[in-house]
Image (spheres, rainbow, N blue to C red):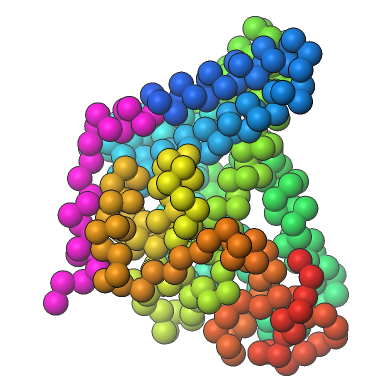
Amino acid sequence: MTTLRQRTRAYTTRDNRRAALNIAATMTVYIGGLLSAIHIVRAGYWLAAVPVMFATGVSAVRLYMLQHDCGHGSFFTRRKANDIAGTLLSPFTLTPYKAIRYNHNLHHAHIGNLDRRDSTEIYVMTVEEYLAAPWWRKLGYRFYRSFVLLFLIGPTLLYVLRYRWPRNTMKSGLGNLLLHNALLALLLGALWAGYGSSGLLVWLGAVVLGVSSGVLIPYVQHNFEDVFWSRPDDLSFDQAAVEGSAVLDFGAFFDLCTANIAYHDLHHLNSNIPCYNLKRCYRDLEGTFRSRKIGFREALGCLRWKLWDEDTGRMAPFPRRGAMPSGQVEANSTI
């Protein structure tokens, strides 16, 4: 019997022309938006520049998705072309190519594995771990999972500061990180030379808007109520890939802006599918497998899920009061 993963292989063909057009079109929007926002700000219309900065930030998120495909070797036909493109895109995405490729591949390899949550993009504690933790660790985890840190402060600190030296840098290649930081310095230097402080402020504004909105994508895709988690003894990679990732049902325009990253279950099942084939693959195979779709309203509801309950096999909110047995965490908890 043909497995789902085997059926997805028909969609793994790379197309250099489509890949190059994707980069060219997205870079055009990014550069055009950034320069337009700078000129609007220099004319004294800060509020009018905000939507343009947001569009610039979204285009940077899309560049990140294209760079992400390069990291999987699924964008261009040749590995060298993927590596060159991924590195050259890195100053615009604030993402060192080889270091994040290394870390992201760990995330794929250990999807759904409770014993390897160190590889996840957003860390999750179990109910049992949380209830047994000392007060200071509970407080730290609550702060880590707060809306303010996860979506307002944290993304900017991560991309602007932490990614100047991300984890596993020495394992993935110091030279690539140094090249990335040099390219970023050249980009910022060019903005300063051409437009002074207003150029840098507009760039930073686009970064903040882009990363804060972009982090919602992986959060919802791996943080819904019935997401799959398991211990290694009971772990099936195919099940973890499909049931540990959700499809974001936000519409065609969202798919365009995010290079089809919404179809995340099939991406985790077979990361060799290029982003420009991923939506077609999902449409052709939809109905032949269990796919978890999440719309706007449910996506907002995902903000309440903070802990993994091993007894119920579901995500749970923070408990309202005291220590409670696993599986009895109250559902009425604040974000």
Q: Residue at x 69, y 15 (%)?
A: 40
For the N terminus, give its image quadrant. bottom left
Q: Is residue 113 visible?
A: no
**Magenta: main secondary structure:** helix
Q: Is residue 79 left or right of residue 1?
A: right
Q: Is residue 29 left or right of residue 55?
A: left
Q: Is residue 190 left or right of residue 48?
A: left
Q: Is residue 265 visible?
A: yes
For the C terminus, give its image quadrant. bottom right
Find residue 15 and report its image quarter. Answer: top left
Q: Residue at x 49, y 81 (%)?
A: 231
Residue 30 appears at what percent x and percent y? 52, 25
Q: Is residue 80 left or right of residue 232?
A: left
Q: Is residue 197 above or below residue 332?
A: above
Q: Is residue 26 above or below residue 302?
A: above
Q: Magenta stretch? A: 1-23
Residue 253 appears at what percent x and percent y? 46, 42
- Observer-nearest of 141 and 295: 295
Identify the residue at the far left of this view: 1
Total numbered badges shown on the rendered structure: 0
Residue 308 appears at what percent x and percent y? 62, 77
Q: Residue at x 44, y 53 (%)?
A: 262
Q: Residue 318: within the magenta?
A: no
Q: Residue at x 65, y 66 (%)?
A: 301
Find residue 105 and report its image quarter. Answer: bottom left
